[in-house]
Structures are given as C-alpha cells and as structure tokens.
Image (cartoon, grey):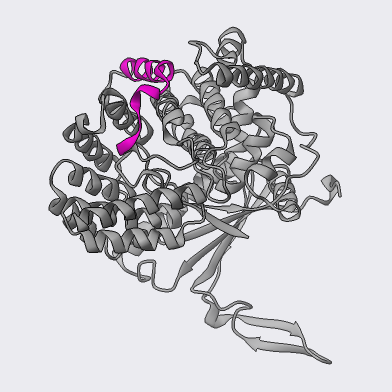
Amino acid sequence: MMRQSGDLQMAEDCVQDAFAIASVNWLRDGFPDHPGAWIRSVAKRKMIDKARRLNTARNAQQALAYETPTKTADMEFYESDDISDDELALVFLCCHPAISATDQVMLILRLVAGLPPVEIATAFFYKKEAVRTRLLRAKRKIRDANIPFKTPSIAEQDGRLESVLAAIYLIFNEGYLPARGQSLQRRDLTREAIRLSRLLCKLVPNSTESHGLLALLLLTEARSPARISKEGELVPLTRQNRTEWHADQIREALGLLAKLVDPHKDGPHTLQARIAAQHALAATFEDTNWENIIAFYDRMMAIEATDVIKLNRAVALGYAGRPNEGMAQLEDLADSKITQGMGYLSAQAELYWLSGNRDSARQCFQRIRDQQENEGIRRAIDRRIAEIDSSTKG
Amino acid sequence: MKYTLILAAEEGSSPDIGSADWASYAEEFGAWNKEASEAGVHRGGEPVEPPTTATTLRMGDSKIEMHDGPFAETKECIIGWYLLECEDLDEVLKWAAKLPLVARGYGAVEVRPVTDFSKMQN
C-alpha cells in the first residue's frame, strides 16, 4: 500500500515556511528481523545505539525540565568519537542511487540509525510482511548486483550526497508531521533525523548542504514547543508564540549558517535553512522580512525552478503584500501535477484570504479539511474557517 | 563480475541511417567500444534489428506457437545489448552512463548482473 507524505509546511501552517514539499510514496509495512550479515561495523552501531539511548533518556529529562542544553548527548558522542570510513561507506551504501528512495530510508533507519524493526514499522504505519519482502529484496540487490561497500571519491560524493540528504530530510518530514493518525509529531523520528544529519556533518565536513540541512532541521525542530497547543491543535506559524521556540537550537543553526560564507555553494537545503532563519530572526510573524525570503526563493529557482518552490514563492509574494502577483504565479502552475496536492490548495486558500476574497478562501479551506486525515490539522483548519466566518459577519 | 546491458529506445529517436548526425553517433559508439575494450571490460555486444523483424515462440496448448513480433509490445524496444565484466555496480554504471544512446538522450539502458551459479547462496 502506498500513501503520500504531503507538504510539511503548507499542510501544517498554511503559510509560508522553510520547507519545500517532499512528496513521497511510502510502503506501509514491517521490517525484517535480521539486519543482514553484510554489515561490517557492528561494534560501531552498538556505540551509536548507546548514544541514542543516552540521548533519549536525556531528552526525556529535558522535556520534563522544559529546557534545552547547549550540547546534546549525540553531539558529544560525535565530537569525541573518531568515526571510521566504514560508517560513511554504510551511509552511502544505504542511499545508493540504484536503490529506490523508499528503500533508502528503510535501510538508513535500520542500519545506520540502528532503529529496531518494530519501531520503524510503528513509526511509518507499515504492514510487516510486504516491507520485510521489500527490504530483503533491497539487500539482495546490494549483494547480487554487487553494489560496492566503499566511500565514493570526493568527486563523486556531491551527487551521491543528495540522496543521503533527501533520505534524512524525509525521515524528519515524516516525524514532524505524520501523515496519519492522531500524533502531530513523532519526536523519535525528528530526533533521529537530526542525529543522522549531525553524523553527516561530521563525516563530510566540507559539504555545505550537510550543514545547511542540519541548520534547517534544527530551526524547524526549534518551533516544536509552540506549534502544538495544550488542546493538541496545530498552531500555525502566524500565531506561534515565538518566545517558546528553542533558543539553543536556533542559535546553533544560525551559527552553522554564518559559517557558510560562499553563496555560490548554497544548495536547496541551505537556502531553505536561510528562509527558516528569517522566521527565527523575526520577533513576530508581522516582523518577517518577506523580501529577503523572496530573494532566497529566487536563488532556489536559479538552481532548479521546481513547482514546489514556485508555489512557496507565490505565497511569500502574498505575505509581502503582493497577493495578486502570487495568484498570477499560481495560475502559471495550473497544468502542474502539484495542483492535485494539499499544498496547492493551501496556497490558494492563503492567497485568496490575503487578497480579500473570503468566499473562495473558505471554499479552499473546506476542501483541505475534507481531505485531511490528521485530527490536529483538521482542528487548526476549522479554526481558520471560523475566523473567516466571523470576519465576514463583522 | 559480469553485467548485461540491455539497450532500448523508441522508434525514430535516433538519427536516420546515412545522415551526418548518424555518422557521428555511430562514431561515438565505435569510440565507446574501443575504450571499453582497451579497459578490458568489453565481453561482447551487438545491435539488433527492429521488433518488426522479431519472431516469438511460446508453448501453446499442444504445440509451440509462433508469433510475429516481440514478446512484449512496448514503446521502448530493445535495440542491442552488451556484456561487460566490471569490478562492481558503480563501475558498470559509469560505462552505461557513457553510452552514446544514454548520453545523447536517445534511449535507456538496463543494467543486470549476470547470474553466477557458482556464487548462488540460496
């Protein structure tokens, strides 16, 4: 069974945000119980597991104390540990471009993150049997097609790194906004993605995008305390109490971005992080520097003008006080597959609202609500609809 | 390790035989063959005639039945094959990516490891 993991930002906030949409088909299944004898660094994984458990325990304590330390256990672990070339080879093996994106994520969670199969199955609402088969097939392909267990040369790494970054991003995405069920955040997955991202920065220190991705994940994770209300409702970026954002994570992310000084090296993840940083730097939503954000989108467009970026840019234009320009951009996307997604509807709803077309905005929100399976998001959209209704009366 | 490269393209995607473009295309294939041979990975390969020349045999109810055409009607048709012997998948993928068919965007290549019965574990 396949399902779509929708747009993190659009579906969640219905506002401009840092994330581009990653639409991915996931298999809902379990995992094989035997990770396979072909993994070389068993000892290394045990150490990672240990660090992960330590981290989980610490994070639980932090949650209780409602504070964030400057250094987490996994940071200390990766700072002190001398990571072998095998570790990097394993990351690249899991994310080999000859393996499907879905299988890449499964392999990386099982073999690099060391997540027990049961945990992965639960986190992704997988049914056990089909993915057991699928993972087995992926591992057989690695063996039979002789996909090498070695670190790609520096020259090859850039291209190969993209799939590693994409896999980590998808793990975070799924954790940040589970597409199904009651939960609004699977912190086990977001933490794991951040941990993997840190590992990658350590393994490939010269890669701008690795640091950019870590900054992006930290900036997004930093909003966690403010994005879910006490009633379990998703709070849109427009109304989040920014004083609740994790200052330490923001500080770390801004520090990472400040070190990336060559704008020509900024890739899509780094630019998304720079956009997220604009939100982090604004004391309130009203203080957001939308012109800066639009400029970052322009830079993303120069790298690759995807429909997702066009969509996000259109909403940014709306918030920058140019909703009609944003609408015109949306119309350019009329023939795109993106019109079938939730993100497009959200963008439309927002731009209608910003341009004062309340009826159309209401219709769009209603359609989003009808298609939404996540209870917390539904309630957030209900609130928007109620707001529109009250403003119409008034 | 041996790999089979199955080359496929849609009809009319490559230049007309005899045209100047076709001559340079054929020349590029010649250069690829030469390079692969000199690297010691080339173990064989031939282009094949279009599917209109194909005859497919299959066992029917009581006797082998012949069918005029390929076993699968697809937009992309097999136009040739190679047998390469490479260290691993990464090496063979590099050769595959350099094929003029792929590099020029005329078609696709499917890379499959050749079954090695001596290494079978299951």
- Please state if B99 lies on the left or on the right of A259 as rendered: right
Give residue A35's quadrant in the image. Answer: top right
Instruction: Tell me which secondary structure the magenta stretch mostly adopts.
Output: helix
Q: Residue at x 14, y 52 (%)?
A: A325
Give residue B6's quadrant in the image. Answer: bottom right
Can I make out residue B23 in this image?
Answer: no
- Please state if A355 lies on the left or on the right of A49 as rendered: left
Q: Residue at x 47, y 57 (%)?
A: A372
Residue placed furthest toward the front: A394
Where is residue A181? Give x, y as percent: 58, 50
Where is residue A326? Give x, y as percent: 18, 51
Where is residue A48? Give x, y as percent: 67, 20
Instruction: Give the position of the N terminus of chain B as an image quadrant.
Output: top right
Where is residue A297? Give x, y as percent: 25, 39
Q: Nearer the viewer, residue A69 or B18?
A: A69
| Magenta residues (range) | A238-259
